[in-house]
Image (cartoon, rainbow, N blue to C red):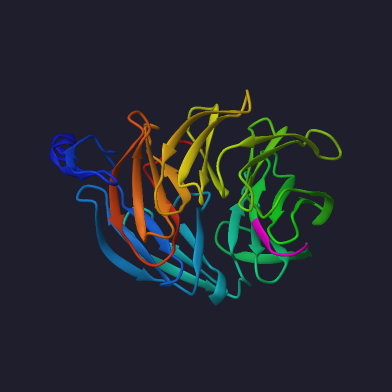
Amino acid sequence: MLLAGLLAMPVRAQGGPATAAAEPVLRHPVFVLNSLDADVSVIDPVSWTELRRIPTGKEPHHLYLTPDERSLIVANALSDSLTFLDPKTAEVQRTVRGIVDPYQLQFSPDMKWFVTAANRLNHVDIYRWDGQELTLAKRVATARTPSHLWIDSKSRTVYSSMQDSDELVAIDLQTQTIKWRTRTGPMPADVFVTPDDRTLFLGLTGGDGVEVFDISGAEPRLLKKIPTGKGAHAFRTAGDGRHVYVSNRVANTISKIDWQSQQVVASYPAPGGPDCMDVSADGRYILVTSRWARKLTVIDTQTRQVVRQVKVGKSPHGVWTLDHARR
């Protein structure tokens, strides 16, 4: 009944008339962070309407699920706080204050460490996590404007891009010291590392592609640059163990990269300044925030068409649903 209802719903593709088309079948709400409204849009995945707004703190940019999957953490950069939400009901569970400038956030796979990038204040904070509480272990001075983070599969190394000093930094989690730093192209943003921890992909928001580094040795080695589109920014794995998407914010496209061949294998339209993404559990649909259009956009990767746009708040950034493909 749910699938039949969704298939019968009119869908307005970008720039075209309403048509009948398939859309993702989700059971849980979709969360969109409205950075300039200081709140979260909760979207009903059946009617594709905004149910309500949840006030957070100033400038919520990114979000992350706790290791026990009981809480979705929203990082409020300008309010120095974290908002914990129930990923199934969208109820507010608690607010944790005193987390300084949490622009980006990551848990280590071993669940011992919680790491934040202080975008305004030029440092990366490493917290111990006991399953409930956070304790600051070390504040690591980095370079100008740490942006996005990645932690390797062995919970040994944090990689962080430096947006305004055009660098990539590696931090040893055990010693909480910088292992190395290397120059990059203009305005590096999101970071993606392959499951074998050997290859790192870096989006260049100030450029038109993705840099690829070999990080298997003591020092990183630049392998190549993959042209994708202007404003290459955020990554999201496709869930198939081989491909990763990158949003090209200025080009208004999303590129699909085969991380084995290190080539673009597909491209999709993504109007309105595409930013963060999530992928439906079956891998078919991309949910992407359209940063400049104040919308959530749904893209069918089979037809390579926009099948739905939902109005949200100002400068939508992070997006997430429990019904997503594996990362």
Quadrant containing the N terminus is: top left
Q: Would residue 152 appear left or right of 31 to someone viewing this image?
A: right
Residue at image point 26% right, 48% down: 45
Residue 293: x, y in percent? 37, 59
Residue at image point 29% right, 46% down: 14
Question: Which of 230 and 283 lies nearest the eye of the viewer?
Answer: 230
Q: Would residue 272 appear left or right of 120 to someone viewing this image?
A: left
Extreme residue in the right direction: 218
Q: Would residue 58 appear left or right of 121 to someone viewing this image?
A: left
Magenta residues, dominant SS class:
loop
Residue 303 included in the magenta stretch of the image: no
Q: Would residue 45 appear left or right of 265 to someone viewing this image?
A: left
Res 49 → quadrant: bottom left
**In this figure, what is the number of numbered marks?**
0
Q: In the figure, 22 relative to 248: above or below? A: above
Residue 12: x, y in percent? 22, 46
Question: Which of 242 and 94 lies nearest the eye of the viewer?
Answer: 242
Q: In the figure, 147 relative to 151: above or below? A: below
Q: Is residue 86 visible?
A: no
Q: In the figure, 207 relative to 154: above or below? A: below
Magenta range is 143-147
Residue 270: x, y in percent? 41, 45
Residue at image point 61% right, 29% down: 259
Residue 193: x, y in percent? 65, 38
Q: Is residue 176 visible?
A: yes
